[in-house]
Image: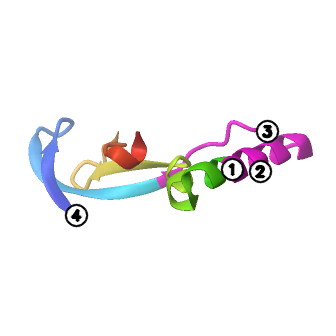
Amino acid sequence: MSDSYCSNCGKTCEHREIIKQKKSPYGKSRKEQFKAFLSGFFSGAMVGGALASLELIDRYVQCTNCGHKTLDNKGEEFQ
């Protein structure tokens, strides 16, 4: 946990990091799932498994005082 300013409650308090999986742009049918597999396979082969998996997650920072969540995909790995 880290201390940072929360714009929602207006003071500096502890924040925690939450990692959530992004919603898939592909549907639930077999054809769409196969497209998702191929997309993941080729992106993993091109940039490596670790970097490809970062494309599938969002990083949020949540205030422990008021519970406000902020999307915080900062850093070179999220570019």
Q: Is residue 20 left or right of residue 74?
A: right
- Label 1: how many residues lie within 10 Å, few (<14), some (14-19) or many (20+)? some
The local secondary structure at tag 4 comes to loop
Q: Which residue is mark 2?
A: 37
Where residue 10 appears, x then y in whole percent? 11, 38
Amino acid type, label 4: Met
**What number of labels is visible?**
4
Q: Which residue is mark 4?
A: 1
Q: Residue at x 21, y 53 (%)?
A: 65
Where residue 57 appears, x then y in whole percent? 51, 50
Outermost residue to the front: 46
The type of colouring in the image is rainbow
Q: Residue at x 34, y 45 (%)?
A: 76
For marks 2 and 4, the one nearer the N-term is 4
Q: CA distance from mark 4 to mark 3?
A: 36 Å
- Tag on residue 40? 1
Q: CA distance from mark 1 to mark 3?
A: 15 Å
Where 43 sits versus 2, above or below? above
For marks 3 and 2, the one nearer the N-term is 3
Q: CA distance from mark 1 to mark 4?
A: 32 Å
- Tag on residue 13? none
Which span is picked out in magenta?
20-42
The local secondary structure at tag 3 comes to loop
Q: Residue at x 49, y 52 (%)?
A: 54
Amino acid type, label 1: Gly
- Label 3: how many residues lie within 10 Å, few (<14), some (14-19) or many (20+)? few
